[in-house]
Structure formats: C-alpha cells, structure tokens
Image (cartoon, rainbow, N blue to C red):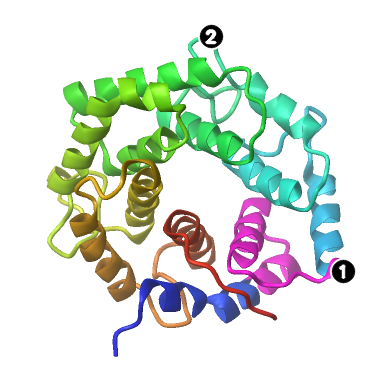
C-alpha cells in the first residue's frame, strides 16, 4: 500500500537523527546541524536536556558579535529553535532587522542585495512567532511589488511563488483583500507550471526535472494559503504534488539531492509546517 505524506515524513526520523549525530561529530557547517535539529523538533522528537544544552552551547560559540550568524537563513533557523526553547533572541532580532532596507526588502547578507524569497521567508516566520515587526507594512509592500513584477513581467519562478503564498497567508486580512488578484494569479501560475510528474522545477520552461526541495516550498505555500483562502483551486495541484513528494523520496533515507541531510531536513520542515501533520517520536 502506498504511504501517505504523513507516513513518509515521519518515516525519516531515524535517518535525520543519525545524520544529526554525524554532523555534530564531524563538526559540519552550523546551518546543516540547525536544519536537522529543527526537523527533529518538527517531527515531535523529544530532545533531552543534555542534547538541548549542547545545541545551545554550540550556537553561542558560533554567534557573531553583531548578533547574527553566517547569513540570514542560518540565522532564522537558529532563531526559531531558540525561540521554541524560550531562549533570548533579542540580539538575533536586531541583526535580522538591520538587514531591512529602505524599501522593506531583506538582504540575505549585508553585502548582498535584497531578495523577495528571503523577505517573504523572514516576514512569515516573524508573523507566525508573533514577534513585533516594525517593518511589517514595508515588507508587505516590497514582497507584493517585487513578486508582481516578477510574475507579470519576468515570468515568475515556482519557489518564489511558494514563498509569496506563505507570506500572503500571514498578511493582515485587509492586505489579503487588496492582494486577492495577485494571490489568484499566483495559484494559476503554480498550476500552469506543475510538471507531468506532479513536481516543480523553478519554471516549466527551464527544461529541468522536478526538484524535491523546490516542490516542498510550493507545497508549503499552497497549504499555508489554503488556511486563509480555503481550497481555491489548490487541491488538485496538491494531490499530484503529494504523490510526487512520496515517489521522489527514498524510504528512511530522505530525498536524493546534493547534501541529502540538509535538503531532507528542509523538506521535512516544509511538509510538516505547511501540511499541519503532527506526530511524536522518541529517539
């Protein structure tokens, strides 16, 4: 019998845990360690106090004087974990907010330009954690203006559509009403760019095969937006996409992409966070 998405995701617990131990033992990049730690938390794994303290100590040893870490995405992962553990994240938040420019865009790194997917990712996380965001409206304006330009003029990319949909699901109701057409056109774009196997590459015209990670970003965006908009034409896309996510995985070994541990951990996060599937596991 074919596995459900929930069975598929939670079937990766042992693999992610084993990889987490290897990453710690061999002193791999912090972003890969943090991604696996976050995935274990999302899968409901009970983290022992010893393991929790070891992770927090590791994080403190890598934190820069300005409060951040290597770059934005690593910092957001760590911030989310520490927030869940009840740790102080004020220094991290100050660094994250220091990356917001005058247009409301987030720079993934102080020397990089502002990017819509990173801005949408940051906005959605801050909103989900109920963290006060003094740049909220500026971020919303940047996300919608930039995505509108990319969708209507440049043709759009599916993972950016997924990031927009996740951010949209966290917009205030009046803002969602203003952006209803953009939301509907984004759903149409996603539907048009779904590949024959049910997955997604950045754009159907790119000639690439479907990619599990990009597909999981779209999955999360669709599920997030359905929480505020209902099905809105998304269910047919999701049915095929769920089949693809199941078919593209390897039982108990994650998804076969480069840096399998890192990509698998991020896919699991997207599938659980967006899919509202729950469980509890002990390791």
Residue of label 1: 50
Residue 147: image quadrant is top left
Q: Nearer the viewer, residue 256 or 277?
A: 277
Rendered residue at 74%/33% (across/down)? 92
State the image coordinates of residue 129 (x, y, percent, origin top left).
Answer: 63, 40
Rendered residue at 51%/36% (across/down)? 124
| Pointer 2 local density, CA inside 10 Å: few below 14, some 14–19, many at least 20 | few
Q: Nearer the viewer, residue 151 or 188?
A: 188
Q: Nearer the viewer, residue 238 or 104?
A: 238
Rendered residue at 63%/18% (across/down)? 134
In the depicted structure, whether residue 218 falls above or below residue 182: below
Rendered residue at 73%/62% (across/down)? 27
Using the numbered discs, state the Cα–Cα distance from disc 1 to disc 2 in whole angstroms: 43 Å
Residue of label 2: 102
Q: Is residue 202 left or right of residue 224?
A: left
**Helix, strand or loop: magenta stretch:** helix
Q: Nearer the viewer, residue 129 or 60?
A: 129
Q: Is residue 167 left or right of residue 265?
A: left
Q: Is residue 237 left or right of residue 11?
A: left
Q: Which residues are magenta?
A: 20-49
| Pointer 1 local density, CA inside 10 Å: few below 14, some 14–19, many at least 20 | few
State the image coordinates of residue 94 (x, y, percent, origin top left).
Answer: 73, 25
């Amino acid at each position: 019998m074919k596995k459900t998405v929930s069975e598929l995701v939670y079937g990766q617990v042992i693999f992610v845990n084993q990889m987490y131990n290897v990453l710690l033992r061999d002193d791999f990049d912090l972003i890969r360690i943090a991604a696996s730690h976050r995935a274990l938390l999302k899968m409901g794994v009970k983290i022992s106090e010893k393991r929790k303290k070891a992770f927090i100590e590791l994080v403190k040893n890598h934190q820069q004087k300005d409060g951040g870490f290597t770059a934005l995405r690593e910092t957001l992962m760590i911030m989310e974990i520490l927030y869940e553990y009840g740790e102080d994240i004020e220094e991290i938040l100050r660094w994250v907010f220091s990356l917001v420019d005058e247009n409301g865009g987030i720079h993934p790194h102080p020397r990089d330009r502002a990017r819509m997917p990173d801005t949408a990712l940051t906005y959605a996380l801050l909103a989900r954690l109920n963290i006060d965001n003094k740049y909220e409206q500026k971020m919303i304006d940047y996300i919608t203006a930039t995505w509108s330009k990319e969708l209507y003029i440049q043709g759009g990319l599916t993972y950016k559509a997924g990031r927009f949909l996740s951010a949209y699901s966290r917009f205030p109701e009046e803002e969602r009403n203003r952006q209803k057409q953009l939301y509907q056109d984004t759903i149409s774009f996603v539907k048009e760019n779904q590949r024959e196997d049910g997955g997604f590459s950045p754009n159907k015209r790119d000639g690439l095969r479907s990619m599990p990670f990009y597909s999981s970003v779209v999955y999360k965006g669709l599920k997030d937006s359905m929480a505020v908009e209902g099905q809105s034409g998304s269910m047919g896309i999701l049915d095929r996409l769920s089949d693809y996510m199941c078919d593209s995985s390897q039982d108990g070994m994650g998804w076969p992409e480069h840096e399998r541990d890192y990509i698998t951990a991020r896919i699991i996060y997207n599938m659980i966070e967006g899919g509202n599937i729950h469980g509890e596991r002990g390791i």
